Image (cartoon, rainbow, N blue to C red):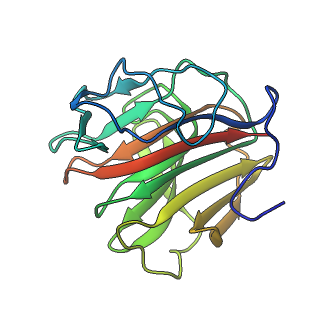
């Protein structure tokens, strides 16, 4: 298996859905993922906490003022999954095994913060950093991926492992993306894969 990808391409695994965001400017909520980078499910985006996610200039943008989570809520809840995005600004991230709930919901976030990757576990109203910061500086255009398999959570930057921890708190969930309240985040090329 190639690092940073899942090899299977069947209805039981592989790329479930992807989104290039290459479409007319407008609201993200309710829009259908375009599967331009592979995918066999027809899924739509939903938003949590804030409806202020938009598509602008063929990228997805979160608003300032409230933490923003957008999720692919129409897909099945699974345990072994990889979620990736291309970071185009300072603080966005990809979420795996996410579920709705108190404040931030529940799940694992690979997050670009102060130029480095950090792994957080959302526990409702709180978030705890897991492991150390990634060793490589993240720049615009880098691909950030979070991979969950059993109790192992691994974060990749351009296919190279940055953080790997063991945590058994959340075993299943859905894919999502995150933008913090402090900045407007820009991301591109979302991909969701399962085994």
Q: Where is residue 51 in the image (x, y as percent from the top left)?
A: 25, 25
Query: Which quadrant of the view contains residue 48?
Result: top left
- Say which quadrant the N terminus sits in: bottom right
Q: Hey, which residue is sitting farthest left in the picture?
A: 65
Q: In this view, does 70 lie above or below 181?
A: above
Left/right of residue 73 with respect to residue 70 in the rendered view: right
In front of the other: 23 or 108: 23
Q: Where is residue 120 in the image (x, y as percent from the top left)?
A: 50, 55
Q: Which residue is drawn at 36% across and 32% down?
A: 103
Left/right of residue 180 with respect to residue 124 in the rendered view: left
Left/right of residue 6 with respect to residue 103 in the rendered view: right
Query: Which quadrant of the view contains residue 191?
Result: top right
In front of the other: 19 or 124: 19
Q: Where is residue 183 in the image (x, y as percent from the top left)?
A: 19, 54
In front of the other: 185 or 56: 56
Q: Position of residue 133 (x, y in %)?
A: 50, 74
In front of the other: 45 or 141: 141
Q: Residue at x 32, y 73 (%)?
A: 114
Q: How many marks?
A: 0
Q: Residue at x 67, y 52 (%)?
A: 147
- Say which quadrant the C terminus sits in: top right
Q: Residue at x 29, y 64 (%)?
A: 90
């Amino acid at each position: 298996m190639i690092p940073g990808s899942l090899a299977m391409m069947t209805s039981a695994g592989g790329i479930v859905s992807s989104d290039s965001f290459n479409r007319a400017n407008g609201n993200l909520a309710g829009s259908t993922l375009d599967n331009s980078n592979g995918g066999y499910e027809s899924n739509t985006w939903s938003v949590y906490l804030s409806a202020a996610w938009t598509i602008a200039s063929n990228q997805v943008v979160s608003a300032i003022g409230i933490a923003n989570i957008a999720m692919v809520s129409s897909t099945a809840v699974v345990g072994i999954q990889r979620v990736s995005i291309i970071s185009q600004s300072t603080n966005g991230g990809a979420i795996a095994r996410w579920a709705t709930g108190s404040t931030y919901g529940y799940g694992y976030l690979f997050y670009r913060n102060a130029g480095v990757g950090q792994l957080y576990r959302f526990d409702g109203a709180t978030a705890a950093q897991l492991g150390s910061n990634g060793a490589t500086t993240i720049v615009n255009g880098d691909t950030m991926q979070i991979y969950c398999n059993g109790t192992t959570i691994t974060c990749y930057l351009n296919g190279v492992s940055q953080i790997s921890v063991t945590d058994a708190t959340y075993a299943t969930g859905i894919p999502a993306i995150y933008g913090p309240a402090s900045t407007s985040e820009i991301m591109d090329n979302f991909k969701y894969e399962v085994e």
